[in-house]
Amino acid sequence: MENKHSNIQIQRLCLSTLAHTWLIDLDGTVVYHNGYKIAERDSFLPGAKEFLQGLPIEDTIIFLTAREEKYREVTEKFLEENEIRYNYIIWRVSKPAI
């Protein structure tokens, strides 16, 4: 597909029909960063809830978060209340030391 305003070629993304595994950062990608600390509860970034709810049931969803385990209950409750399906949450993911 050719963009009529430039020479850039745009290609269609064709995904396999097999199930996919999604590795998704939670804070700042799905929910507002530190919302669970600042506002005392999480809230979705625009379009995130709809995106997650649109993922096929056969896909695997793994959330990554820098949150400590002490936030497990409140985080899992938020996802459950909002009908967000996931398979795993990996806690305490942080930036590597440089």
Image (tube, rainbow, N blue to C red):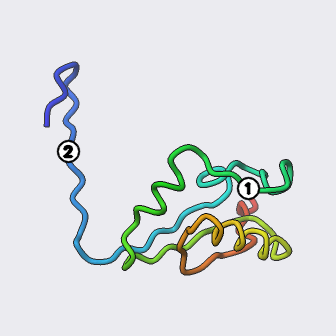
- Residue at the left extreme? 1
8 horizontally vs 48: left or right = left
> Do labels 2 and 1 touch, CB within 8 Å?
no
Answer with mark 2 or mark 1, whichever residue precedes in sequence: 2
Is 5 placed above or below 21 here? above
Displayed quadrant of residue 90: bottom right
Q: In the picture, which quadrant includes the C terminus?
A: bottom right
- Residue at the top extreme? 5
Is 55 placed above or below 51 here? below
Residue drawn where x is 51% and y is 68% of the image = 23
Task: Report the Cα–Cα distance between label 2 and label 1.
Answer: 36 Å
Secondary structure of the residue carrying tag 1 is loop
Residue drawn where x is 56% and y is 43% of the image = 46
Q: Position of residue 19 (x, y in %)?
A: 32, 77
Residue placed most toward the observer, 8 or 75: 75
Please tell me how crowded label 2 is: few (under 14), some (14-19), or many (20+) other residues with Cα within 10 Å. Answer: few
Amino acid at dot 2: Gln
Residue that label 2 marks: 11
Q: Position of residue 28 (x, y in %)?
A: 66, 50
Residue that label 1 marks: 42
The numbered disc on residue 17 is none
Amino acid at dot 1: Asp
Displayed quadrant of residue 80: bottom right
Displayed quadrant of residue 16: bottom left
Residue drawn where x is 76% and y is 61% of the image = 97
Q: In the picture, which quadrant includes the N terminus?
A: top left
Q: Position of residue 29 (x, y in %)?
A: 60, 52
Is 4 placed above or below 18 here? above
